[in-house]
Amino acid sequence: MKRVQIGAMSKIQFRTPRPEDGRKIWALVDSTGVLDLNSAYSYMMLCKYFPDTCAVAEKDGKLVGFVSAFHSPNDPKTIFVWQVAVALSERRKGLGIRLLKEVLGREACRELRYLETTISPSNIASQTLFHTLARDLKAPCRVMNGFSAHLFPAGAHEDEPLYRIGPFKI
Ligand code: 9YT
């Protein structure tokens, strides 16, 4: 008898991004409702100049996840993670941590010992994500002053506390 799989789980695929993804990344970030939406140009630029430290996740050809990051220009052992965006349909399934581990597992990240990011108080999912990452890396996570609300124009932004994870060894 022929077996028919009903509702088979589609596989998520990870890859380095290309400038052609910029438009879709922009729409994904917009859809999250918690991230700062930057220009489509900035996403194209990240894809073109920082592909080794950025990643996209696709499911059935649809872009469902994105992480942007770059090596700190002041410290090659530190990576700064700018944004982690996960599509609503993929929330609470561990996609955020898979995206981060996809980037950290690359050759370009072998020498890293610290990760920094900023997360607004309302982005609970991201706070949980980075505490989980710290636990998995067996490294401490310190939360300190990052970009205070008063630095933003017209008081239209929350504080962005800085999360610093490390030291860790990949
Ligand atoms: C880790 C992460 O996604 N942080 C967000 C930083 C900031 N609020 C932004 O760019 O959205």
Image (tube, rainbow, N blue to C red):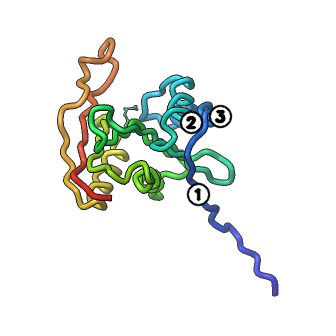
Residue that numbered label 2 is attached to:
25
Residue that numbered label 1 is attached to:
12
What SS does tag 3 mark? helix
Q: Which mark is residue 20?
A: 3
Q: Between disc 2 and disc 3, whose residue precedes?
A: 3
Q: Where residue 4 sits in the image (x, y, percent)? A: 76, 76
Give the distance between the C-alpha atoms of the residues marked 2 and 1, in whole angstroms: 16 Å
Q: Amino acid at mark 2?
A: Ile
Name which quarter of the figure residue 71 lies in: top left
Can residue 92 be seen by looking at this rendering?
A: no
> Is 47 situated left or right of 143 in this image?
right
**Local crowd size for mark 3, using a 10 Å CA cut-off: few (<14), some (14–19), many (≥20):** few
Q: Between disc 3 and disc 1, whose residue precedes?
A: 1
Q: Nearer the viewer, residue 157 or 95?
A: 95
Q: Quadrant of the N terminus?
A: bottom right
| Disc 2 to disc 3: CB gap under 8 Å | no
Q: Amino acid at mark 1?
A: Ile
Q: Which mark is residue 149?
A: none
Q: Where residue 41 sits in the image (x, y, percent)? A: 55, 23
Give the distance between the C-alpha atoms of the residues marked 2 and 3, in whole angstroms: 9 Å
